[in-house]
Amino acid sequence: MSDYDTVSADVEHEEEIPEDHPRYQDLLTRHRIETGVEKGITHLQGMHAEGRGSAFDYLLGEETIPSADDAERAAAAQLLLADHPVLSINGNVAALVPGEMADLAAVTGADLEVNLFNRTEERITAIADHLREHGAEEVKGLEADARIPNLDHQRAKVDADGIYDADVVLVPLEDGDRAAALEEMGKTEIVIDLNPLSRSPQVADIPIVDNIIRAVPNVTAHARDLADASEDDLRAIVDAFDRERALDRAEKRIRSGVE
Ligand code: PTJ
């Protein structure tokens, strides 16, 4: 039996997962999702969602492919150009990258808003508290005093001074119809999803096909790098980004192993 076989599913703290384990990132991800479920942050369905994502990540080689890095730079430029950017948070996002989302919000001047498919007041409050514990200053989504038109489920509930008012929205980890409804409202959308065929990246202005654990810190790094760029330079980065090419490259990598 190798040392790696002894890494059991019931580690209490993520520090117990050896960083040199060949599947370190996947084990870390599973651990964070399980902890999220235990804390009432992540819905049980979030485990299925993670399983879907991890299968695609395996086929992508569990790395940020070059076209995803391009998308992450374009996303950073788009967030810096925005008048009112909002980062949408669900139960999986909160469990996986709470501090990283707070950092991205701080660097780009974005709002954080909790938006849930399986919405309960208990989960909204638990997620908002969790984000604050990880450095978030203000968390929206608790008011839910506006509705996304033409959307017949809980994800339609948004804050009037949050997602409803935003010009740019980051929509991570949801294979759903909200992205299309937000597009109908005229919003610019950045989507993070490991499945390029999922509904949300298919309609996104900037689809990022990458694991959120790698994607968010990389968008933040690009935003720091672009902090002093002119509006023209930021606009040029966004305009040069080709969404169809990014989706094609990711699908090709998944199907054939080469980009
Ligand atoms: O917290 P709630 O109530 O809002 O519910 C959130 C979940 C995630 C349960 C809900 O949105 C859901 O069921 O999502 P889906 O329809 O399974 O879609 C999740 C998408 O995220 C899939 O397309 C996965 O490929 C993708 N995904 C999962 N994990 C990751 C990911 N993409 C990037 N990074 C990941 N770690």
Image (cartoon, grey):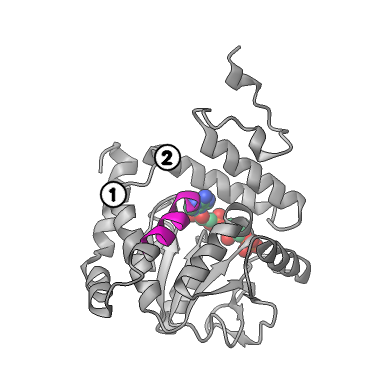
Image coordinates for residue 135, horizontal then vertical, percent: 63, 64
Give the residue number, with chain letter if any, for mark 1.
66
| Residue at left offset 51%, top offset 32% | 23
Mark 1 residue element? helix
Q: Is residue 89 above or below residue 95?
A: below
| Residue at left offset 52%, top offset 46% | 52
Most foreground residue, 7 or 253: 7
| Residue 205 appears in the picture as rendered | no
The quarter holding residue 138 reads bottom right
Predominant SS along the magenta part: helix
| Numbered badge on residue 62 | 2
The quarter holding residue 97 reads bottom right
Most foreground residue, 165 or 258: 165
Mark 2 residue element? loop
Magenta span covers which residues?
211-222
Image coordinates for residue 209, horizontal then vertical, percent: 39, 54
User: Does the Cβ of the disc 2 residue fall within 8 Å of ligand 1?
Assistant: no
Answer whether residue 215 is magenta in the image. Answer: yes
Which corner quadrant of the figure contains ligand 1? bottom right
Image coordinates for residue 122, horizontal then vertical, percent: 78, 67
Q: Amino acid at mark 2?
A: Glu
| Residue 45 appears in the picture as rendered | yes
Most foreground residue, 153 or 94: 94
Q: 10 Å neighbourhood of mark 2: few (<14), some, or many (≥20)? A: some
Image coordinates for residue 204, horizontal then vertical, percent: 38, 68
Would you say 165 lies left or right of 154 here?
left
Answer whether residue 137 is magenta in the image. Answer: no
